[in-house]
Image (spheres, rainbow, N blue to C red):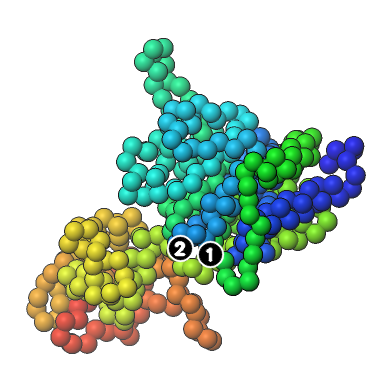
Amino acid sequence: MSQTEPAGHGALLLDALLAALTRYVILPTPQAADAVVLWIAASHAQPAWAHAPRLVIRAPEKRCGKSRLLDVVEATCHEPFITVNSSSAAVYRSISEDPPTMLVDEADTIFGPKADGNEDLRGLLNAGHQRNRPAKRYDANTGRVESIPTFAMAALAGIGAMPDTIEDRAVVVRMRRRGPGEIVAPYRHRRDRPLLRQLAEDLAAWLRADLATLEQAEPSMPVEDRAADTWEPLVAVADYAGSHWPKRARAAVLALTAEADDNGETSTRVRLLADCRTVFGTEPALPTATLLERLKSDTEAPWADYGPTGLTAMKLGVILREYDIRSANIRFLDGTQAKGYQRADFLDAWARYCPAPALPDSPQNTELPLFEGGSRPSRPSLVIAGQRGTPSIRGTA
């Protein structure tokens, strides 16, 4: 903190920003409001950060306040850059070592069905989360390859979920319509924005006075891996502000990351792995046709509509090969032979990507394959009975 500022100055600024934010917008939880405040503040110190967290403002329907929240973010963040009707070249050329804050409303124009022609902008938003991920472009006039910076914080508002590549790198705020008794002040751009911009200038003066300290900050984080990368700038700002903000920041991290986990919004690939575990049950192997039939029979799963004819054997194989799971020729005890999958081949992927909840008083990961000759040990006492439709213990690759 600058020696010219009184103790607690930063905390008071964050308090003022929180008061302004909640004057115009109803946030779903106090932790979500704190997270938005810290994200806005962090945008003023982007040169200090190794990662540029995204802010995803999503809602299930219209009139949930997402655009109003984006208005307040625009008025209080560092150098807002609205990408509506901006060419990809203009957006790329606007990013420098001290980048603006990218703002995208109606994000379906970039990621949804109407996204044709926005590949460059999608690439920027995916790559720009981390430093030193420039876009490469060939300049025909000079005959040289140019490196164009992509690093910039970005806020995106839209209906429904954003792609995994965005939400995995984002602070996700799930807006909802105001309920009875929830009242906010009307926001008027001409009247209210100048006061919010003054608050933005105060935040910039506070944080920019000591970027070196922020750059060296290594705050203790309650989460790990990519989540820690995403939230670190926000927690660093909270620690720099002091007072009650360090505690509130970490509470926000835990609340919003737990919310993301509870919503179960996993990738399509992991969803397929989990669904395969369900349809296998305890059977040691299934013909590919049977596996597909069972997957597509679940009316709440996406597999019946996965492509024009639903999930196919080829698409299934392509996805599962990413986890080193491959089909094989299996001879069943009824004398038939068909392409199929062995349950044993799924065990490693299930344990790594979608572990089942442990049963009370039961050790985890005790599943063993039911085929001999595989890459994993088998339990000798598990012998396949001569039931119709069950595989023999002979399997050919």
Question: Quick check: marks 1 and 2 in contact, CB under 8 Å?
Answer: yes
Foreground residue among 198 and 298: 198
Which residue lies under the disc numbered 2? 60
Is residue 151 something that shows in the picture? no
Element assignment for label 2: loop
User: Which residue appears at 33% of the width and 65% of the height?
Assistant: 272
The alpha-carbon separation of the residues under discs 1 and 2 comes to 7 Å
Residue type at mark 1 is: Arg
Tell me which corner region of the image, top left, top right, bottom left or bottom right, holds residue 131. Answer: top right
Residue 237 seen from this side: yes
Residue identified by numbered label 1: 176
Image-based side of 183 in relation to 89, left or right: right
How far from the left and from the top, in percent, is residue 43? 65, 42
| Quarter holding residue 28 | bottom right
User: Residue 303 lies in what quarter of the image?
Assistant: bottom left
For mark 2, does the 10 Å Cα neighbourhood hold few (<14), some (14 to 19), or many (20 or more) residues? some
Near-viewer residue (381 or 228) = 228
Where is residue 58 drawn, in percent x and y? Answer: 50, 57
**How many numbered badges does the structure rendering display?**
2
Residue visible at 42% across and 20% down? Answer: 145
Q: Give percent across and percent down for residue 280.
A: 29, 76
Q: Residue furthest top?
A: 142
Could you classify mark 1 by the number of other residues whose Cα lies within 10 Å: few (under 14), some (14-19), or many (20 or more)? some
Q: Horizontally, is 239 left or right of 234 in the view?
A: right
On screen, residue 162 above or below 178: above
* Element under disc 1: loop
Q: Is residue 100 left or right of residue 310?
A: right
